[in-house]
Amino acid sequence: MMHSVSIIVPAYNAESTIEKCTASITESIKNTSTPEIFEIIIINDGSTDNTKKIISNIPGVKIVNHDKNLGLPFARNSGINHSNADYMIFIDSDIVISNNWIDSMYKSIHNSKNIIGINGVIGSYPNKKLSGLDNYLFGKFRGVKNVNINTPLNYKFFVFSNTIIRRNVLNEIGFFDESLFKYGGEDTELSLRISKKYPNGLRKLEKASSYHITQKSVDQYLNDMFIYGKYNFHQIIEKHPDYKNDLGYGWVFSFKGRLLFNIFIRFLLKITWRLTKHPLVMKYLVVDSFVRGARNKT
């Protein structure tokens, strides 16, 4: 059967979350008026835990198994290559979506030829006590707030963890850059290419809510930002040199950046974070980790 929409779920060592993720997708499909046009494609990206066994028992899904872990960009591209649909939905394996997510996202993009891709909204799991990191990730100090489907979204805030996008645009622009296999940047790089061609085509739909099942620790998150700065960030600005300052290069080596991001301020704000857990302090520590990584380019 020819499907109009493929829902691609990359999974690597996702044994603790993949069933909840796919169950939420299945329920969301049931809440559409045309459930037959949707398919779910799970990409098992060389998992070493029980992910492969678990997904083999999930009914009604297409499974693609990789022999080894090839990275998130490769996994997403693998899903695209196993689909003939007109629209691609990307949902990370540690996310659950709301019952209206698929219906609202599909109708919003299908009914407007000017919309290229749409982000849903990611929040903390319902009824979960918010940590200090959660307050930064899902609060007013990060990303773009108060946007709607009629407002173009800046490419820097467009992520592919809960997204719908037109397949023909991916064919035209190109898929995810598989050289960005370390943490971070593959979303930004693809969104940047899309925005160059379609500057008003990326949007955000507030009513399409989704939730992270698990959350990284502060140390894990800061280390990920360090890795992004050290590796993928430099690859992206080499590919798009005209956007290097827009992507944050000025903070790395400028006089202003060296004044603001240094060992002394970092030490003081780490102490402040332990005492206050204020999201503005976390915002500094996140950018500082990225800057330190970028300065440690190998």
Image (spheres, helix red, strand yellow):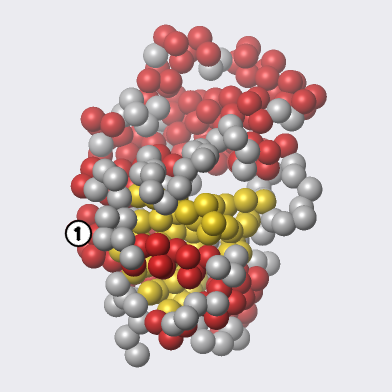
**Secondary structure beneath disc 1?**
helix
In this rendering, the answer to whether 122 lies above or below 288 is below
Residue at 47% from the left image edge and 54% from the top image edge: 205
Where is mark 1, residue-wise? 172
Which quadrant holds the N terminus? Answer: bottom left
Q: Is residue 262 visible?
A: yes
Amino acid identity at mark 1: Glu
Q: What count of labels does the image hold? A: 1
Q: Where is residue 210 drawn, in percent x and y?
A: 58, 59
Q: Where is residue 289 drawn, in percent x and y?
A: 55, 29
Residue 200's quadrant in the figure?
A: top left
Residue 105's quadrant in the figure?
A: bottom left
Which quadrant holds the C terminus? Answer: top left
**In the rendered view, does 93 fall on the left or right side of 241?**
right
Residue at 58% from the left image edge and 25% from the top image edge: 284
**In the rendered view, does 268 fall on the left or right side of 32?**
right
In this rendering, the answer to whether 53 lies above or below 189 is below
Report the front residue among 179 and 256: 256
Report the front residue among 89 and 249: 89
Q: Is residue 75 visible?
A: no
